[in-house]
Image (cartoon, helix red, strand yellow):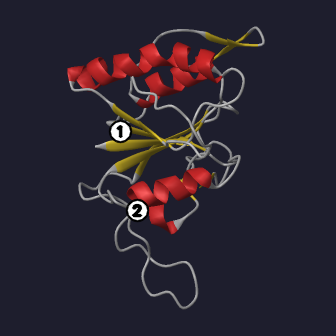
Amino acid sequence: IAIAILDDGIQTVTPTVGAAPVPSHPSFIGNIFNGAPKINAFYDFIANAANNDNPTGNHGMLCASVSGALAENPPNEAGITEGLSGVAPNCSMIGITISGGAVPLIRTFLWAAGLNTNITFLNGGAAIPIPALPAVPASIISCSWSLSGATAAARYAAVLPTLRFLTFYGRNGRGVMTFFSSGNAPAQPPLSP
């Protein structure tokens, strides 16, 4: 099972040009129970790069840690004798930095679920390449953010069919579960696919 964190990404360091990115925190360095790497894919949909070397914040790292930090990982602070374990330490993870428009979000959800849409997306007239799909597509997509602002309703309406599609047809008909935070603002009506 893979958990995709759609947020600020799981921060990486790319040691040299052309090298594979590696997680920058010990909670994500290592393998899960079956010997597969803890992180099976990274993608920054803002920079269109297969890494999370330049996250826009640290919220994605926090969400990823709670969701799936490795068990028995080493502490990274003096005086602490144990590392943090996430709720699902033996699940692989996909770290994704998101872009907020409706079309980029649709593309991101489909990519995380391992669906190659063969759609050419344009950015200012230039074609954006479709990144290589995750080695293990997401069974669960975590979105600890909400659509807000003046265009939130329109973006939600545009993204909703994709969420419904993933719910019923993702993972070859078994469905991909997608979870959103409830938001921090008062009086937000519940939204569901």
Residue at the extreme front = 187
Above or below, 89 against 161 in this view is: below
For this rendering, which residue is in front, 59 or 44? Answer: 59
Identified at 55% across, 20% down, the residue is 156
Q: Amino acid at mark 2?
A: Gly
- Report whether residue 99 is seen: yes
Q: Position of residue 16 (x, y in %)?
A: 67, 51
Quadrant of the image occupied by residue 130: top right
* Residue position marked by numbered label 2 in the rendering: 30
- Residue 88 lies left or right of residue 106; in this view the side is left
Disc 1 vs disc 2: which is toward the camera? 1
Identified at 57% across, 40% down, the residue is 145
Identified at 38% across, 64% down, the residue is 70
Q: What is the C-alpha distance between the residues marked 1 and 2?
A: 21 Å
Above or below, 68 against 170 in this view is: below
Quadrant of the image occupied by residue 117: top left
Res. 140 mark: 1
- Residue 149 lies left or right of residue 114; in this view the side is right
Secondary structure under badge 1?
Answer: strand
Secondary structure under badge 2?
Answer: loop
Of the 4 image quadrants, the one containing the C terminus is top left
Of the 4 image quadrants, the one containing the N terminus is top left
Q: Position of residue 47 (x, y in %)?
A: 70, 33
